[in-house]
Image (spheres, rainbow, N blue to C red):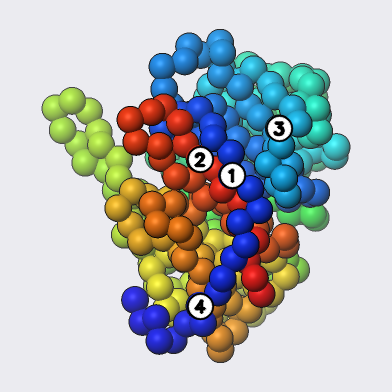
Amino acid sequence: MPSSTLIELSATLLWEREVHGTAGQYPMFDAVGTGLYYSDGWGRRPAPSLRFRRLSALTGIETARWPCGSAVRCFVRLGDDLLVATDQRLVRLDAETLAERARWDGSVRHATTLAIHEGVVVAGNPVTPTITFVNLEGGRVRRKRGGPVVSILGRRAGPPIVANVAGGLAIADTDTGTIRPLHQTPPSMAAALAEDERGCWLIRGTRVRTTEHDGGVSIWPGDPGTTVEWYPLGEGAVRSLPVPAPVRTIDVAGDTLWLTPAAIPGSEQYVVIEAATGDVWQIWHPPEQAHVEAVAPSLDLVLTTTRRPGTETTVLGCHRIDR
C-alpha cells in the first residue's frame, strides 16, 4: 500500500461491548438517528434464543431486543420502523423498541440487500440468480432472474437500482416485477448511490469466487479493488477514481467516500476516506486484531469487531474518527 500518499487519521474509542458469537453478528448503523443493530452471532446457542439487538451508537447501551431465530443480514427504514430480512422472512419492527408489527414468512431467501418502493420490497444476494419482489400489502411474492446482485439501492424518487455482480446497472420495476437494463458496467464488488441520486459509485472487481467440489460449492471473497467508478443514472460521463489502498466496501455521505477492505480474517484493516475528487486521501487503522465491520460517515463512526480466542464471544468497539 502506498502509505506515502495518505494522511493518517486518529480516532477516539467511544465504547466497547462483549457480544455473543465468534462471528456473524452483521452489525449495521441506522441511516437515521444514532442506532446500531446486530444479531447474536455463531455459537452453540439454540435458534429460539437468538436475538436481534439495538444499541445506542454513541454509548453502546442496549435499548431493545427481538427474537430473530436467524441473523438479520440487512434492513431498510420504513417510516419510524425497520423492515428486516432474516433467512426466510421479512419482518417490520419498531426502530426504537423492536416491537414486531408484521411479518411475511417465506418471502425472501438469504437476502443480503433490499430496498422498498411504493410498498414493494426488492431483495437479493451475491450468490443466487433470483431477485425477489414482495408486495407488503397483499403478500404476493414474485421471483425473477436478474442476479446475483451486489446491491439493491433504494431511491427517494423512483424504483430501486440493481447493481449486478457480473456487471451492469438495472431498474427494478416494482409495478411489473421486471428488471430493466440501465447501464453497462464491468463486474463490481460493491455499489453505493450518490447522495444526489444522479449516479452510482461502484468498486470494480469480483465480489465472490466459487469453487465446485465433491462436497458442494465453496464461496470465497474476491480480491479487493483499487478503482472506484461513478456511473450516471441519466446524462453524463463515467468517472474513474484510483484508490490508493485495496477495498471491497463503499459508503457515501455527501461528496465523501468511505471505503474498507471488508472484515476478512488475515487481511489488513483500515478505512480510506476521500471527498470524491481524488486530491487528498485519508486513512485510519483500527487497533491490532480488530476488523472494520461497519461505518457511519455522517457521524464519523467506525464499528470494529475483535474475536475473544477460546470463547464464543466478540468485542464490538465504536470509534469516532478525529477529523
- Mark 3 residue type: Glu
79 left or right, relative to 268:
right
> Of tags 3 and 1, which is closer to the observer?
1
Q: CA distance from mark 4 to mark 1?
A: 23 Å
Give whichever of 53, 161 is nearer the camera.
53
Q: Is residue 298 above or below residue 141?
A: below
Residue at the disc numbered 2:
315
Give whichever of 135, 207 is nearer the camera.
207
Instruction: Give the crowd class for mark 3: few <14, some 14-19, many >=20 residues within 10 Å.
Output: some
Residue at the disc numbered 4:
8
Rendering coords of residue 253 (x, y %): 69, 66
State yes or no: discs 1 and 2 in contact (Cβ < 8 Å): yes
Is residue 109 at least partly visible in the picture?
Answer: no
Instruction: Give the crowd class for mark 4: few <14, some 14-19, many >=20 residues within 10 Å.
Output: few
* Residue drawn 80% across the image and 49% down it: 33
Residue at the disc numbered 1:
16
Rendering coords of residue 113 (x, y %): 57, 42
